[in-house]
Amino acid sequence: MAKDLFPTLDKSIITGNLDKDVLDYFPKIAIKDQTDSTNDDAKNYLSNQDSELSIHLAEQQISGKGRNGKKWISPKGKNIYLSLGWKSPLQYSKLDGLSLSIGTCIAKVLNSYTNDKVRIKWPNDLILDQKKICGILIETLEINKMVGVVIGIGINVHMSKDEGEEIDQSWITLDQFSDVIHDRNEIVSKLLNELILLIKNFPMEGFKGQKPDYERMDLLKGKDCYIYIDGSKKRVSVLGVNDSGELLVKENSEYLSLRYGEVSIREL
């Protein structure tokens, strides 16, 4: 497929498709042709950031990051590499459930392109046709006694099989699923409309505001899975999540609530 069929990222197009409420929030949007990591860009910018929120995009990442230090494959001009830098008014304890809230917002946008086929695998993967289409990496740092939050999002849009050959799990792109060449500018605008509204409301609502939508797209609820925690492997039944975004599971007759970061999970 010819390279020029894939529109480049364009700040004016993205801004032109933002809702008025989002424009009133006036986030700074920066787009780079190439960067080490949009999360690092957001993190570095946060230290001197005047506004509450900044948006960082790139056509290509040289050192993109996934969960647990894994490399995020980032071919040029093919996917969405987006990070938000948020000067949060919240303390660390009040950020519980943010990752699930972010995933829910992204899934709602992607479902507008996929006939409601995207599901959320706790805590931060979006799955389409049993393959990963999106990952989320949230990092925090302290800035003048405030909590800085970096929300990193990677979405597969145009990437070819050869470009993704280093990825160590099954993956899919939006274009592969729907046989359409999607415009990343349109997708980014829709994402920002959802995400910025979430960031405005999260301090008041927490995860509760997104929980009904999350439950509708929960991939694991009702399934038997293996969890890996503190070096041990357990077979559990997944019951769902609580209002803090913790995973609720049952092991034999024991009920457990598991926090993001302390456990990994795999379907049987």
Image (cartoon, grey):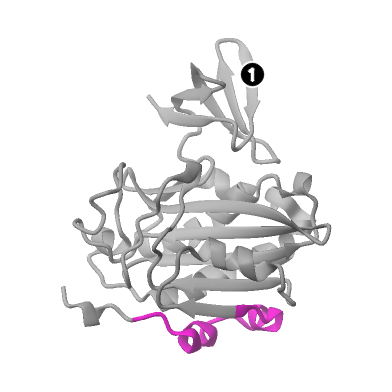
The residue indicated by pointer 1 is: 255
Residue 242 position in % (x across, y down):
67, 36
Secondary element under disc 1, as helix, strand or loop, is strand
Which amino acid lies under the numbered mark 1 shown in the image of this protein? Tyr
Nearest the camera: 115 or 92?
92
Q: Is residue 43 magenta?
A: no
Query: Is the N terminus in the top left, top right, bottom left or bottom right quadrant?
Result: bottom left
Please identify the residue farthest to the right as the structure is shown. Answer: 145
Q: Say which quarter of the image contains residue 56.
A: bottom right
Nearest the camera: 174 or 29?
29
Nearest the camera: 65 or 129?
65
Q: Residue at x 62, y 59 (%)?
A: 150
Instruction: Specify start and end residues of the magenta stretch as a single range.
Output: 8-28
Classify 239 as above or below 5: above
Residue 195 visible in the picture:
no
Q: Which residue is drawn at 33% across and 73% down?
A: 77
Residue 41 vs residue 71: left or right?
right
Q: Which residue is drawn at 52% across and 40% down?
A: 122
Q: Is residue 15 magenta?
A: yes
Residue 253 position in % (x across, y down):
60, 10
Mark 1 Cα within 10 Å, few/some/many (few <14, many 20+)?
Answer: few
Residue 175 position in % (x across, y down):
27, 64
